[in-house]
């Protein structure tokens, strides 16, 4: 910490000098002026007016990004981050987004910067942002930084990481509602889980996140949501976050319920052996619209809504197995 005399003390001495008479004040300032100039102090430094306070945020790369004040112009290249900015009441500060940031609806009116992983560098620079928010997997970070832009890379993959992102965004934007926002999300997920009967804990669930059969594992944020709902995920943590699965693995696991987007649910019955999977044979497949799928696959402020969609699916499709029903 700087041990120089505080600016308030310097100003106080100067005021006392003026009270002792114009001559002594003039002499005092004549002696003080060279020191002030030599120290590089401005009037703002002496009075404290306009003094900047550093604001540091550590992103998911482990990089500390410093700001003199909360950014006023933001480009967001990840939908979940765009949603988080808006959920914290700062939507008006967004000046550009990636092509997939479609919620809230007002984001559709903003200039689009292309894809989040490989955006248009020229379009981003043209918006003159104070900060660019993007995923750690984006290839644009180094290029944007080389052009003098501040970049904050945040890519939550678990509930805990999403909680951390909300806290960091609250710090960055100086938004006081960050704590309350996470509390509301957490409470909403709990409320959704409480709508399910105890029998739901016996259900085996499969959540494919692509038509190429990548599945949501237990370690993913989707897997954590399934765990909070009390059901059994057929993809164990040992297989990774979103592993690509062999179709035969799903047949052997025999899920009771499948949750998938309309696109990813196409022609499931046509896969070899899948007609014998209980979820397929008994039509226990929840086919989510593209808008619902956006909610489900984004670890963002709408996680409580995602949990409620999953809970509704389980109530609609998750009846006990025939042999377990009461006579």
Image: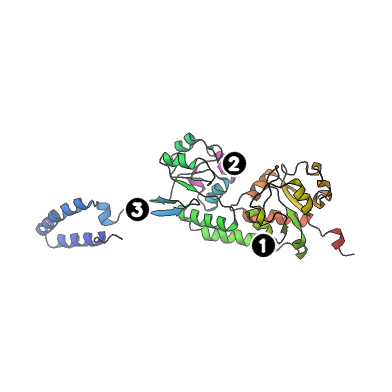
Task: Name the colouring of the figure.
Answer: rainbow
Q: In the image, what residue occupies the spot 78% across and 57% down?
A: 318
Give the residue displayed 12% in from the left and 53% down from the top.
30
Q: Determine whether the residue tagged by mark 1 lies in a helix, strand or loop.
A: helix
Residue annotated with mark 1: 191
276 left or right of 186?
Answer: right
In the rendered image of this protein, does residue 319 appear above or below residue 129? Answer: below
The disc at residue 100 is 2
Q: Position of residue 259 (x, y in %)?
A: 73, 50
Q: Which residues are magenta?
A: 90-110
Measured in 3D between alpha carbons, the distance from the residue under mark 3 to the one under mark 1, in whole angstroms, is 43 Å
Gap in Å between the C-alphas at discs 3 and 2? Answer: 35 Å
Residue 231 location (% of width, % of height)? 72, 60
Residue at the left extreme of this rendering: 23
Is residue 93 inside the magenta stretch?
A: yes
Report the number of numbered marks.
Answer: 3
Label 3: which residue?
A: 52
Pick the quarter of the image with the N terminus: bottom left
Tell me the element at label 3: loop
Decide which of tag 3 and tag 1 comes sooner along the chain. 3
**Residue found at the far top of this picture:** 122
The picture quadrant where one finds residue 319 is: bottom right
Where disc 2 sits, the SS reads loop
């Amino acid at each position: 910490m700087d041990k120089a005399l505080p600016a308030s003390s310097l100003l106080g001495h100067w005021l006392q000098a003026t009270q002792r008479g114009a001559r002594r004040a003039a002499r005092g300032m004549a002696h003080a002026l060279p020191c002030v100039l030599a120290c590089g102090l401005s009037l703002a430094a002496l009075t404290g007016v306009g003094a900047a306070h550093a604001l540091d945020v550590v992103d998911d790369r482990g990089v500390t990004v410093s700001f003199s004040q909360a950014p006023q112009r933001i480009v967001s290249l990840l939908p979940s981050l765009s949603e988080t900015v808006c959920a914290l009441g700062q939507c008006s500060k967004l000046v550009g987004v990636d092509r997939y940031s479609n919620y809230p609806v007002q984001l559709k009116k903003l200039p689009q910067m292309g894809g989040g992983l490989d955006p248009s560098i020229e379009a981003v620079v043209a918006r003159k942002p104070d900060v660019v928010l993007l995923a750690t997997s984006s290839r644009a970070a180094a290029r944007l930084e080389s052009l003098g832009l501040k970049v904050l890379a945040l890519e939550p993959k678990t509930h805990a990481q999403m909680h951390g992102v909300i806290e960091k965004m609250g710090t960055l934007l100086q938004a006081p509602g960050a704590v309350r926002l996470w509390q509301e999300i957490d409470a909403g997920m709990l409320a959704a889980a409480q709508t399910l009967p105890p029998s739901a804990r016996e259900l085996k669930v499969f959540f494919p996140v692509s038509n190429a059969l990548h599945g949501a594992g237990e370690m993913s944020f989707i897997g954590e949501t399934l765990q909070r709902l009390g059901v059994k995920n057929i993809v164990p943590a040992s297989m990774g976050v979103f592993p690509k699965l062999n179709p035969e693995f799903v047949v052997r696991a025999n899920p009771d319920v499948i949750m998938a987007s309309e696109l990813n649910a196409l022609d499931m019955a046509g896969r070899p052996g899948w007609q014998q999977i209980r979820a397929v044979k008994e039509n226990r497949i929840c086919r989510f619209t593209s808008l619902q799928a956006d909610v489900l696959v984004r670890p963002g402020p709408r996680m409580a809504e995602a949990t409620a969609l999953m809970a509704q699916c389980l109530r609609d499709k998750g009846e006990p197995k025939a042999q377990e029903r009461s006579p």
